[in-house]
Image (spheres, rainbow, N blue to C red):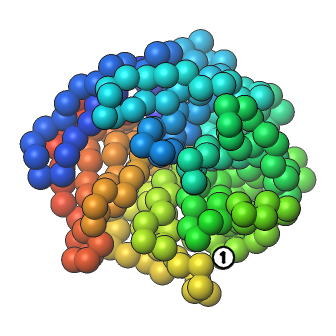
Amino acid sequence: MAPGATAVGLAVAVTLGAGGWQSGPPLPVARGEVAAASVGGEIAIVGGFLADGASSARVDAYTPAAGRWRRLPDLLRAVNHAFAAGWNGRLYVAGGYGDTGPSRAAWVLDGGSWRSLPSLPYGLAAGGAGVVGGRLYLVGGVTMNAGARALVRRALVLDLRRPTRWRLAPGPTSREHLAVVARAGRLYALGGRTAGFDTNTRLVETWRPSERRWRRLAPLPEARGGTGAAALGGSIVSIGGESPTGTIASVYAYDVARATWRRLPDLPTPR
């Protein structure tokens, strides 16, 4: 977490071009460094740090249309900085930091219970996930190499229709605490850092699975790690994040067609 950051249970929403933020019901249990995914009209919040610094196995789902939270089955183990994505009404979770470092575990929540998926080839945490063409991609993050922390160079991919083994795919510029968004058959990697908060980057890259390498787009207006991100209409939105001086309130939207950024209303509470 950023300097002075704490676990929070706030929920707010904004509509592009429609003014400021609106408050929603708070997260039932305050957490930080969660994973989040959109699944079947709900927003799932997975694991994270509790206010006392312990990792959580808790999973909650928010229904924007109804404005309420419901509890989902707990993860099989507590994690923070995990990867999460939704596909075909199912919630997929992989990696994250456990008690002994980056985890190799992967699960899917299907029919009200968690089921194990093939283990990752190596422990992985603090990256981002997205689904394109029925395949789950884990992008960026941290692993351990000979007992030392190392940034990964390649993405991992699992065919969700035949989930038998993870394979390697091209990765963006190596970094952790980046945000990853899937939109219209492409993956987008936003921000992140290579070590401490002073290594935050403005880098934005995109890749389609048929391409050989990631390519750079217009950079973020401000460097940030730990940013949240989402695809909304024709835009990719970067929400808050962490900086050397604390958490960030600023929010930016990237217009995919125009290849330009514009600033949206700041978050009411930086995070």
Task: Name above or below for residue 203 compared with residue 122.
Answer: below
Q: Amino acid at mark 1?
A: Pro
Q: Is residue 187 left or right of residue 244?
A: right
The image shows residue 192 at horizontal and vertical percentages of 50, 54
Q: Residues within 10 Å of mark 1 (few under 14, many from 20)?
A: some
> Which residue is identified by label 1?
170
Task: Name above or below for residue 184 compared with residue 85.
Answer: below
Q: Residue at x 43, y 30 (%)?
A: 62
Residue at the far top in the pictured view: 52
The image shows residue 15 at horizontal and vertical percentages of 19, 46
Q: Residue at x 37, y 58 (%)?
A: 231
Q: Is residue 41 left or right of residue 17?
A: right
* Residue 14, image quadrant: top left
The image shows residue 262 at horizontal and vertical percentages of 18, 60
Viewer-nearest residue: 155 or 225? 155
* Residue 27, image quadrant: top left
Task: Name above or below for residue 120 compared with residue 103.
Answer: below
Q: Residue at x 40, y 51 (%)?
A: 229
Q: How many numbered markers are drawn?
A: 1
Q: Residue at x 58, y 18 (%)?
A: 50
Is disc 1 placed on a helix, strand or loop? strand
- Whether residue 8 can be seen here: no
Residue at the far front in the pictured view: 111
The image shows residue 65 at horizontal and vertical percentages of 31, 34
- Whether residue 236 can be seen here: yes
Quarter of the figure that contains the C terminus: top left
Task: Name above or below for residue 160 compared with residue 41.
Answer: below
